[in-house]
Amino acid sequence: MQHGITVKEALNIGRLKEGKVVAGEKGLDRIVSYVDILEVPDAINWLRGEELLLTTGYAIKDRPDIQENLIWELAKLNAAGIIIKLNRFLKDIPEMMIEKANELNLPIIQLPADIPYIEITHTLLKEILLRQNTERWVNETLKELLNCDYNDVDKIKNKLKSINSNFPVGAPVVLAIVSYNHASDLKKFLKITELRHNSKIISGEIDGNLVIIFAVNISPVWKKEIEEILFYPNAIKEVNNDVVCIISKVIKNLSELQKEYIRLNDALKIINKLPVDKRIGYFYDDIVHYIFLNKISNSDIAKDFVEYVIGPFRNVSDKDRNILINTLYAFAKNDGNISRTSRGCFMHRNTLIYRINKLKDVLNNPLDSPEELFKYNLALTLHNLIEKL
């Protein structure tokens, strides 16, 4: 996912150190994968995203409409930013460009007129290429580590140390896999920049997914600690179809890394089928029972069990059947607690009580024992999974 350097890092390389950020400071974490020259207006049509552009402003001089629109177009195309070299074409950076850049968090860097382009492009491209080669090697090493059957713990430790020499290989670890469509979505929810600079973390890309290994302390609140390291506040509970993260248990024996990696990958493939609240992040511990039920849901014995338990609903009309089944499922999942069920279903308490009484008649069951509620919870969970086969 990270294929270059950040604008902030670029500002510490070569003569770009002499540049001054005049707008868009909140966008300094944008990624620079390319460095290009922009001196003709239609050059913007060739951009790929993540470019840091250099210009003298010749193409936009005396054109206020183009000046503001240029910033908007660059932000829309996910450019890294723009370096403007003040000269006879642009003696000052127009205020409207600065305002728009601050609004869109697109960095504008003012460059002294005496610095040749090549002293910027050459040093930046060299650093970007070095970073990309390093990332490629890390990704390949991580893929080898998690796809090969390593039983030698010392060999695993050496591999981890080769990726990050400061990584505490003697500590327990937690593994996370993040599936995403666009890097921009990922950065909204995950602390990508902080992860890169944390000595207790190793990260890379395998088959288009972000893979992260955390060194952790064994603690009753380890899940909360992982959340705080990985996600922005409350982001784990956000709903976004383009980003899904599955987090493993605490792994005390490094020889189990590959097994956990396979588990998480398998979970990613079916997470949308599981009857769980939709969110960005899931701990495998919290959904392992649903994963198990999904694996057996296509078996004859599971289908026979479901048919046996919910058979009485065959005598109920289609309209009432779905309402009553959904009510029973919510009631069973909430351990027969009327207050929690009504809140969770956004249903008036009296309406819920009416439906429960109707369920008691249909099922010929008082619905007052934990064993019975467990049976219906299990059967209806399987029923939902079978419906999605």
Image (tube, rainbow, N blue to C red):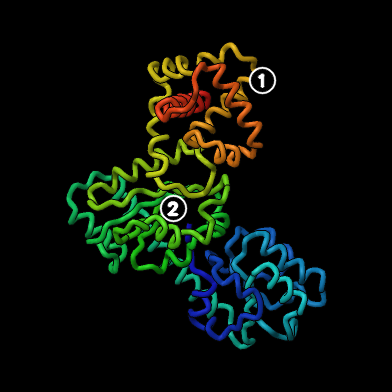
Q: Look at the picture and state if 380 lies above or below 7.
A: above
Mark 2 belongs to which amino acid? Leu
In the rendered image, residue 275, in percent from the top left (x then y), is placed at: 50, 35
Position of residue 309 relative to residue 164, above or below, is: above
Residue drawn at 62 percent across, 61 percent down: 78
Label 1 neighbour load within 10 Å: few <14, some 14-19, many 20+: few
x, y (%) of residue 286?
Answer: 41, 43
| Foreground pick, 32 / 388 | 388
**Residue at disc 1, secondary structure:** helix
Q: Which is more N-terminal, label 1 or label 2?
A: 2
Which quarter of the picture shows residue 196? bottom left
Pinpoint residue 368: horizontal percent, then vertical percent: 47, 27
Residue 319 - label: 1
Left or right of 150, for residue 369: right
Determine which of the numbered discs, if any, sits on residue 88 in the image. Answer: none
| SS assignment at label 2 | strand
Residue at x 66% of width, y 75% of height: 55
Instruction: Name the residue carrying label 2.
Output: 210
Q: Is 189 or 36 nearer to us in this picture?
A: 189
Of 233 and 126, the residue lying toward us: 233
Residue found at x 82% / y 69%: 65
